[in-house]
Amino acid sequence: MKARLELLPIDVAGEWRPGNGEEYESLYPATGEPVARLRAASPGDVDEAINRADRTFRNSGWAQMLPHARAAVLHRVAALIRERSEDLAQRQRLDNGKPISETRALVASAAGTFQYFAAALETLEEAITPSRGAWVTMSVHEPMGVVAAITPWNSPIASEAQKLAPARAAGNAVVVKPAEVTPLMALELASICEEAGVPRGMVSVLPGKGSVIGDVITRHPLVRRVSFTGGTATGKHIARIAADKMMPVSLELGGKSPTMVLEDADLDHALAGVLYGIFSSSGESCIAGSRLFVARRIYDEFVTRLARAAGSLRVGDPSSERTQMGPLITAGHRESIERYVALGVSEGGRIRSGGVRPSGAGFDRGYFYTPTILEGLANTARVSREEIFGPVLVAMPFDTEDDLIAQANDSVYALAAGVWSRDFKRAWALGRAVQAGTVWINTYKQFSVSTPFGGWRDSGLGREKGREGIFQYMQQKSLYWGINEEPLAWAR
């Protein structure tokens, strides 16, 4: 009989202790075995954490520190992440089952995010605006207070860094609600922030069910902003609460991103980009290129090559350096994906690749699924319109660019898109015509922390990353300095 795992503490405003919610285990998706045992936060823990965070925000002096002094702490966070990068990458692998090569990249991304926002903070400038009278006018930005970061399970450490770093740079206290099934990385980051010099109480990590803990956090009167990454239905629920509170939100939600391969594309590059765009991260990505439109003249050749290449992708143990696709996050999520594939077949689709669980040693306990390509479906089919969030690609031919643009934009989502063409002008025109927050041309799923990211329509509101990312966590204030020699004329 295996020894029971030690109970993992959570961070309630700098106090590391078990939560007062339900006890549960975090499972390794590759084997289904527990890797951590913890008690979730309770609504009482949430209230305690937020009230203590508000007091710490007002009394710790963090918000009043000169920007370069706060930046120095963020630089130390980045350095500590790099010092512990391999350990963090291995923990991230256990947290959500991503291949180790990918978790190493996510850890490096998290360090780079803290470094970037430290540098951006040091060089952030206020503005003296053009005067329109006998006064000097200034525009300044100030921290909000307590802000909340609600993060997803697919890329925890990177997602949490993208919210924690700018919110901390802006001077706020931050309450993090990680996904229930992936609590480990947020706890690691909170510990690193504390070690780097962030005042105790300025960061909390409150694991638990989003429908309970996330809801209590969002409704709390002292929470001044919520940044959420996750499903569209939950995002809309948060937006309704925020509207009643007159509270700003950032919502990075779902996607059904189109990838467009024109007849003049470099097919080798397009093939690699399409494979990476949908099947990396096992398709569990909001920006996954899950709708493929290929010029009819090259459709058969391209999809035949694509299906062959998808079938040769290495699915397996996330700890192996060779693995390209690990398991899905839970057994329930795999079952959801299987239902979508069955739905696609019932709607008239044909499976060109995958569509089954892999068999053999090593696959019997984990939540693995093969990279799947469906064709023979219209853009109006449910599997072409609903976010599957797994390794399922729907391939469709197109005849004209007008037809292509109409189909690519015929979606409630507008998060990302990809264009493959050797013709610069055609690619530029398509990139401007497609409705999406991010468009990749002759590449896919590449990111820069210096470039804003977000979606349109049901894909969300607001932007993360970039220098403006700090201002998302600040309130703007205008100052007027009177320089008139005489009293105001009206009062004479």
Image (cartoon, grey):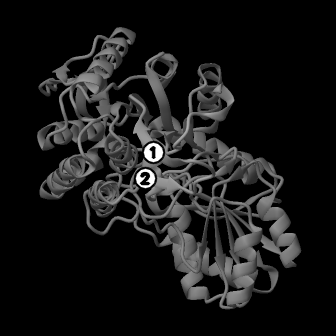
Question: In x, y percent, where is residue 261?
Answer: 69, 78
Callout 1 secondary element:
strand
Q: Nearer the viewer, residue 202 or 160?
A: 202
Q: At 57% across and 47% down in the image, what residue appears?
A: 134
Tell me: residue 193, above or below residue 147: below
Image quadrant holding the C terminus, namely top right
Sort mark 2 into few (<14), some (14-19) or many (20+) by Cα contacts within 10 Å: few
Tell me: residue 433, above or below residue 435: below
Direction from residue 397 to residue 367 in the image, left or right:
left
Kind of residue indicated by mark 1: Val
Sort mark 1 into few (<14), some (14-19) or many (20+) by Cα contacts within 10 Å: some
Q: Is residue 338 visible?
A: yes
**Mark 1 — residue?**
140
Q: At 57% across and 57% down in the image, what residue appears?
A: 130
Q: Are marks 1 and 2 in contact (CB under 8 Å)?
A: yes
Location of residue 422 (image quadrant): bottom right
Q: Identify the mark at residue 341; answer none if there is no mark.
A: none
Q: Nearer the viewer, residue 174 or 333?
A: 174
Could you tell me how far apart the alpha carbons at marks 1 and 2 are, in whole angstroms?
5 Å
Kind of residue indicated by mark 2: Glu
Q: At 67% across and 89% down in the image, what residue appears?
A: 424
Question: In x, y percent, where is residue 310?
Answer: 53, 70
Number of disc labels:
2
User: Could you tell which of marks 1 and 2 lies nearer the N-terminus?
Assistant: 2
**Mark 2 — residue?**
126
Q: Nearer the viewer, residue 397 or 215?
A: 215
Q: Is residue 262 visible?
A: no
Image quadrant holding the N terminus, namely top left
Question: In x, y percent, where is residue 246?
Answer: 61, 25
